[in-house]
Amino acid sequence: MIVLGVETSCDESAVAIYDSQKGLIAQELYSQIPLHSIYGGVVPELASRDHIRQTLPLIQAVLKKAQLTPESINGVAYTKGPGLVGALLVGATIARSLGWAWQVPTVGIHHLEAHLMAVMLEENKPPTPFVALLVSGGHTQLLAVEAPGCYRLLGETLDDAVGEAFDKTAKLLGLGYPGGPALSKLAEQGNPHRFHFPRPMISHPDLNFSFSGLKTFAANCYQANQDDPNIAADIASAFQLAVVDTLWIKCRRALRQMDCRRLVVVGGVGANRQLREHLQKEMQSIQGEVFYPRPEFCTDNGAMVAYTGYLHLKNGEQDSLSIEVKPRWDLTEKEF
Ligand code: KG4
Ligand code: ZN
């Protein structure tokens, strides 16, 4: 089965073709970062308009790259939610219309499930069951994954998502948008021990998180030391260490609770080098294993949508002809 996947939930237009025999055969991504960066964050209306401009040419480009004509496509998948409503509608409309024109089944995908399934595109795939840490710009969740499609929420953030905390702290330090990669780069030059950031919620026995206090702590440190040339790097470094420590403490608790030694880390912040290295070391020390998608499949991409679409389509699922998106959508209410 050959599936075309379309992702337009936020600020990346991304498409890919997954072939169940050959694996991923083509992908293209257009990032809107330059478009939004002057505003310091995503402007939803500009995002939708740019998806309209980019998505069809990207689809033409992947077909060309894969040396396929539309007749070879057996199914179409698109991100149905969660995400920005206007941005989602562009991908849903294009994908649903192409599916209708090509007379192939079309299926709407949950964006977080696609992030989770991205790890299955790697050679080193995790056997189920496993604990998953999903850390993106909009979500921070710990999930028990019994099998693909069988997700149980163990804990989640009560306020900011980790990616959001990275972005807000980066903004405060005068770094560009999106702040996560920039903050992480700056952190390499800083002293992580100059400030001791709190490790939020670690004394709570549950598996929930709270990250909004970290940016307030960062703001206070910054205001008190504005003339110091190293201040931004030192804050970035201590902030990142606090995030990584806190995530590991809760992951370890979830693994113990589930009596499991397999951890899967997905979503944009999963590309963070310090987080990857720290979890690798800690999981080794408990004779466990951590699995990641490659960094470019941690952030939004079309490959994860095409692959997740394949999983659903091979089960015989397909959408009706109506075009529907779900800007808010709980992963655990989704049936596979
Ligand atoms: O998964 P994603 O591409 O989009 C959402 O579904 O939200 O995640 C984007 C988030 C942004 O907040 C971005 O700053 C963060 O992931 N991010 C990072 C890194 N790369 C992306 N955060 C920390 N370190 C990184 N290397
Ligand atoms: Zn995402």
Image: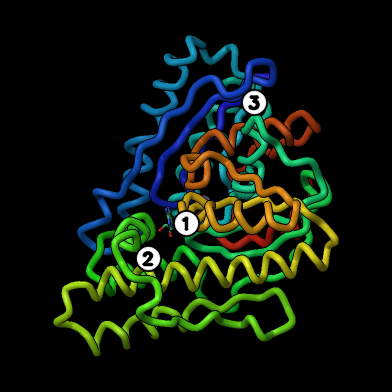
Asked if the residue at label 2 sits under 8 Å from ligand 1, the reply is yes
Q: Using the numbered discs, state the Cα–Cα distance from disc 1 to disc 3 in whole angstroms.
A: 38 Å
Left or right placement of residue 45 versus residue 333 in this view: left
**Which residue is nearer to you in this view: 245 or 68?**
245
Label 1: how many residues lie within 10 Å, few (<14), some (14-19) or many (20+)?
Answer: some
Residue drawn where x is 81% and y is 45% of the image: 128
First in sequence, mark 2 or 3: give its number.
3
First in sequence, mark 1 or 3: give its number.
3
Residue under label 2: 167
Which part of the image, by quadrant, shows the N terminus? top right
Q: Quadrant of residue 73?
A: top right
Q: Secondary structure at mark 1?
A: helix
Counting from the top left corner in percent of width and height, residue 32 is at 32, 46
Q: Using the numbered discs, state the Cα–Cα distance from disc 2 to disc 1 in whole angstroms.
A: 16 Å
Residue under label 1: 274
Q: Is residue 245 above or below residue 277?
A: below
Label 3: how many residues lie within 10 Å, few (<14), some (14-19) or many (20+)?
Answer: many
Q: Quadrant of residue 226?
A: bottom left
**Disc 2 vs disc 1: which is toward the camera?**
1
| Amino acid of disc 3 | Gly
Counting from the top left corner in percent of width and height, residue 23 is at 62, 22
Q: Is residue 64 above or below residue 239?
A: above
Q: Using the numbered discs, state the Cα–Cα distance from disc 2 to disc 3 in whole angstroms.
A: 36 Å
| Amino acid of disc 2 | Asp
**Which residue is nearer to you in this view: 286 or 119?**
286
Residue under label 3: 75
Counting from the top left corner in percent of width and height, residue 186 is at 29, 61
Q: Secondary structure at mark 2?
A: helix
Q: Quadrant of residue 306?
A: top right
Residue drawn where x is 73% and y is 34% of the image: 311
Residue drawn where x is 45% and y is 37% of the image: 14
- Whether residue 167 can be seen here: yes
